[in-house]
Image (tube, rainbow, N blue to C red):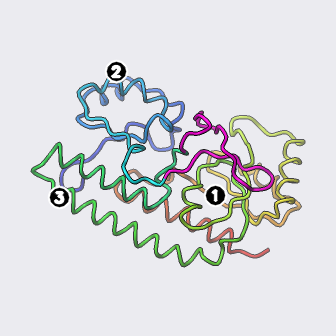
Amino acid sequence: MAGAGAPRLLIPAGTSPHGFALSPSQAGMLAKAEVVFWVGGGLESALAKPIATLAKAARVIALSRTPGLVRLPVRHLGDDGHGHDHGHDHGQEANADDPHYWLDPENAKAMLAAIADTLAAIDPARKDLYARNAAAARAGVDALTADFMGRLAPLKDRPFVVFHDAYQYLEHRFGLAARGILAIDPDRPAGARHIAELRARMVKLNVACLFTEPQFPSRLATALIEGTQARIGVLDPLGTGFPPGPDLYGNMMTANLRAFEDCLGARP
């Protein structure tokens, strides 16, 4: 929207989209909106009712319905590293899509087009501006993708595990080799027995890297890799460490792809 205005962010940076509750000021923001972009109920389930009741005058765009999206089912990675359709920590049905669509750069480009088209329909006087902004953003996504395709190609067979299964779209696009999900609740401390079981899984899978996220305590990851050949990397599907704005997506994707490159590329 550069040159036309600035969007308002309904869910603050660093806040989980799953159990979010609107403040009175946020409810007022939603009620006054002309257009609301959200991924959809599969991710931001807590917003479904407020959007339906408060944003009655707005055009509501669920980006999960964008035509042409690559869609992957929610999965469960067992000890064999193979995916199985299974319910997942966002509460979807077994045959639902994984809602982290934006982590595939091609999906991000499709969403950019949908956003630009919607803004142009609401504000036709600036349709050329929205089209130019979207084209520039897509070019940036293409450049980032081409760069990391080459950089990550030598690492495609290096196995890793994650604490949070948010990254299969990124894995699918860049050919990376997830081997498991270590089921960890960041709000509940893991006991010694559970840590030992998870560590045994990592040894069995010959894991090169354990990827955690900012909300997980670093001491837990350190305990898990003790006695293994694995290293620790940090991923973040929401880019919570970056300020909201037009550069957030590129910064977030670059940080995640560099985390894969650095952790999987290191040698024990």
Distance CA(mark 2)–CA(mark 1): 38 Å
* Crowd band around label 1 with a 10 angstrom C-alpha radius: few (<14), some (14–19), many (20+): some
Q: Is residue 78 left or right of residue 11?
A: right
Q: Earlier in the sequence, mark 2 or mark 1?
A: 2
**Front residue (pair 24, 39):** 39
Say the numbered circle drawn on residue 234.
Answer: 1
For numbered disc 3, what is the local secondary structure?
Answer: helix
> What residue did someone put label 2 on?
53
Q: Which of the two labelled residues, at mark 3 and mark 1, occupies the earlier sequence position?
A: 3
Residue designated by label 3: 129
Query: Could you tell me residue 140's position as x and y percent?
Result: 37, 68
Verify whether residue 76 appears in magenta: yes
> In front: mark 2 or mark 1?
2
Q: Residue 186, how many percent across, how many down?
A: 69, 40
Q: Position of residue 45 (x, y in %)?
A: 49, 31
Residue drawn 26% across the image and 35% down it: 59
- Secondary structure beneath label 1: strand
**Residue 65, x across and y down, in percent:** 39, 43
**Type of the residue with mark 1:** Val
Closer to the camera in the image, 265 or 72: 72
The residues colored magenta run: 71-97
